[in-house]
């Protein structure tokens, strides 16, 4: 009996805290009652096939438009949408997209929104839906699953999201990494919806896409440490701020640093360049 309890505890601990889980791990996990599986794709693609028991969530349920940029919705709104997806306080939530870059970023942003509001047991499927199909081509569904109301209570953490004034105040004092592709950082191309070229003064480029293999599986921790600790010179014990065009790309850097590499203090500038790059009073470099 004691040995069985140890096995149960080990299984729960493993899946509660893994930032990225493999298809075989998810195949075992979805048999558990407290698992909520969330698909981030569009409704048409979802109806063409998804992982059994998955529910579809729209990124707009977690973000709201504020002028030229978007911000995370309020804790009350996040709580409402999480409950509508059947999320309880003890739920294990697994997110996945259909191997399109933006869907993977939607997964990391929804993970960020849930974690910022107090839910700790959150994972992303490594390799996305296509990785699932590679292992379980015959184990898919086209059924629309019934939603059950959850009891999740949001407890917002104010130390994760930062605003324009916070970023201004910490330029040159706290390392800032930009998640956009290098061509935007270097002012070789213009991000959609951003007036000015270049990047936040003193920031450095750390594009989110180079943290993954071609099949959208996450690189090894050793490879990621070579990037973040070696190239970017970040300290896991000290504060770092991540930003991008409008929050989605930065959410992946935030997720990898805080959840996969266990950095102690990672913050995210949600409005990012959609706010910063459309003002004339914000310091920028090319």
Image (tube, rainbow, N blue to C red):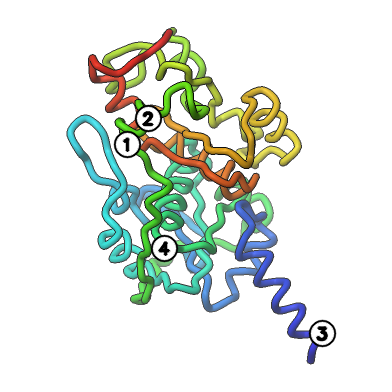
Precedes in sequence: disc 3 or disc 1: 3
Can you tell which mark lies on residue 167?
2
195 vs 122: above or below: above
Q: Which residue does the image show at 60% across and 75% down from the upper left?
A: 31
Q: Dot 2, how many residues are within 10 Å of its Cα: few (below 14), some (14-19), or many (20+)?
A: many
Tag 3's secondary structure?
helix
Q: Which residue does the image show at 29% across and 53% down from the upper left?
A: 61
Q: Single out the mark in the foreground, 4 or 3.
A: 3
**At which x and y percent is residue 91?**
49, 71
**At which x and y percent is residue 56?**
39, 58
Precedes in sequence: disc 2 or disc 4: 4
- How far apart, in angstroms, are the residues tagged by discs 2 and 4? 36 Å
Q: Which residue does the image show at 73% across and 40% down from the upper left?
A: 220
Precedes in sequence: disc 4 or disc 3: 3
- Classify the position of the C terminus by image quarter: top left
The residue labelled by disc 4 is 55
Tag 2's secondary structure?
helix
Q: Single out the mark in the foreground, 1 or 4.
A: 1
The residue labelled by disc 3 is 3
Q: Single out the mark in the foreground, 3 or 1.
A: 1
Precedes in sequence: disc 3 or disc 2: 3
Tag 1's secondary structure?
loop
- How far apart, in angstroms, are the residues tagged by discs 1 and 2? 6 Å
- How far apart, in angstroms, are the residues tagged by discs 1 and 4? 32 Å
Q: Say whether marks 3 and 1 touch (CB < 8 Å).
A: no
Q: Is residue 152 left or right of residue 204?
A: left
Can you tell which mark lies on residue 163?
1
Q: Dot 4, how many residues are within 10 Å of its Cα: few (below 14), some (14-19), or many (20+)?
A: many
Q: Is residue 9 visible?
A: yes
Which one is nearer the viewer's eye here, 257 or 21? 257
Which one is nearer the viewer's eye here, 254 or 210? 254
């Amino acid at each position: 009996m004691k040995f069985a309890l140890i096995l149960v505890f080990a299984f729960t601990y493993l899946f509660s805290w893994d930032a990225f889980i493999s298809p075989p791990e998810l195949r075992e996990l979805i048999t558990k009652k407290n698992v909520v599986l969330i698909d981030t794709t569009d409704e048409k693609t979802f109806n063409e096939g998804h992982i059994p028991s998955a529910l579809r969530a729209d990124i707009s349920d977690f973000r709201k438009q504020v002028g030229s940029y978007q911000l995370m919705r309020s804790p009350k709104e996040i709580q409402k949408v999480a409950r509508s997806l059947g999320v309880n306080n003890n739920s294990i939530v697994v997110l996945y997209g259909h191997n399109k870059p933006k869907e993977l970023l939607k997964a990391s942003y929804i993970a960020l929104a849930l974690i910022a509001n107090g839910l700790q047991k959150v994972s992303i499927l490594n390799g996305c839906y296509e990785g699932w199909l590679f292992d379980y081509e015959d184990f898919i569904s086209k059924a629309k699953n019934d939603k059950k109301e959850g009891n999740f209570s949001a407890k917002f953490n104010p130390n994760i999201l930062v605003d324009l004034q916070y970023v201004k105040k910490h330029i040159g004092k706290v390392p800032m990494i930009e998640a956009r592709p290098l061509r935007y950082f270097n002012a070789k191309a213009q991000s959609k919806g951003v007036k000015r070229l270049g990047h936040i003064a003193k920031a450095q480029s750390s594009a989110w896409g180079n943290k993954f293999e071609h099949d959208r599986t996450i690189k090894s921790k050793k490879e990621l440490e070579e990037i973040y600790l070696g190239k970017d010179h970040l300290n896991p014990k000290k504060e770092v701020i991540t930003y991008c065009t409008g929050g989605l790309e930065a959410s992946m850097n935030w997720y990898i640093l805080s959840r996969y590499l266990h950095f102690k203090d990672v913050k995210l500038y949600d409005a990012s360049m959609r706010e910063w790059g459309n003002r004339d009073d914000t310091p920028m470099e090319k």
